[in-house]
Every structure is written in structure tokens, then in C-alpha cells.
Image (tube, helix red, strand yellow):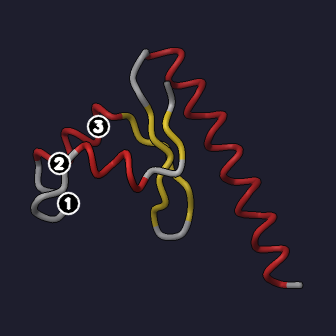
Amino acid sequence: MVKLIKNIVFELRLRRKIKEANKISQLTKYRCYVMLVNGRPEVYSKKDLKEAIARRKFKKGFNTQSLDKIALYKTQ
């Protein structure tokens, strides 16, 4: 029963973040990604993630192609 409730809450959060990503993408024309951060979905623009990679926030060898593989959702 607890797993069911946790899954429902996760799905609701994910849907909310997907809507937010679509809205940001339409306004700014940037591609957005929904990714898991500390077990919760978060929205990031590709521009911000490229800057974080340049600042070495991720492990060595991490690139934008890796983002496409681990993202839960990508805007068009």
C-alpha cells in the first residue's frame, strides 16, 4: 500500500514537471530536460546543463549525449 501511494505521488510530481518543462520550452525556445535529482524530478534547460558541464559539476566524460540517455523527459 505504501509503494502504491509513493508511486502515485511520484507520477503526480513527474506530470507537473513535464508541464512546467513544456511551458518553459515554449516561452524561451530552449530545450528542457526533466531529470531525477535526489529522488525528485527537476526541470533543467539544456543551456544551463551545458554551463554546468563546463564548470565541471559532473564527472569527467559527461556530455550532452549522456543527458539524452538519463533524462526522464525531453522537450522538442
Which badge, 2 or 3, is on the more N-terminal residue? 3
The image shows residue 60 at horizontal and vertical percentages of: 10, 62
The image shows residue 15 at horizontal and vertical percentages of: 71, 45
In the rendered structure, the answer to whether residue 62 lies left or right of residue 27 reads left
The image shows residue 29 at horizontal and vertical percentages of: 43, 15
Q: Secondary structure at mark 1?
A: loop
Q: Secondary structure at mark 3?
A: helix
> How far separated are the C-alphas under marks 1 and 3?
13 Å
Above or below: residue 6 compared with residue 31? below
Q: Residue at x 69, y 54 (%)?
A: 13
The image shows residue 41 at horizontal and vertical percentages of: 55, 55
What kind of residue is marked 2? Ile
Which badge, 1 or 2, is on the more N-terminal residue? 2
Q: Look at mark 3 in the image and give the residue it sits on.
A: 48
Q: Residue at x 25, y 43 (%)?
A: 64
> How far separated are the C-alphas under marks 2 and 3?
9 Å
Q: Look at mark 2 in the image and give the residue it sits on.
A: 53
Q: Residue at x 37, y 45 (%)?
A: 68
Q: Quadrant of residue 22?
A: top right
Query: Residue reaching furthest right?
Result: 1
Q: Secondary structure at mark 2?
A: helix
Which badge, 1 or 3, is on the more N-terminal residue? 3
* Towards the viewer: 45 or 71: 71
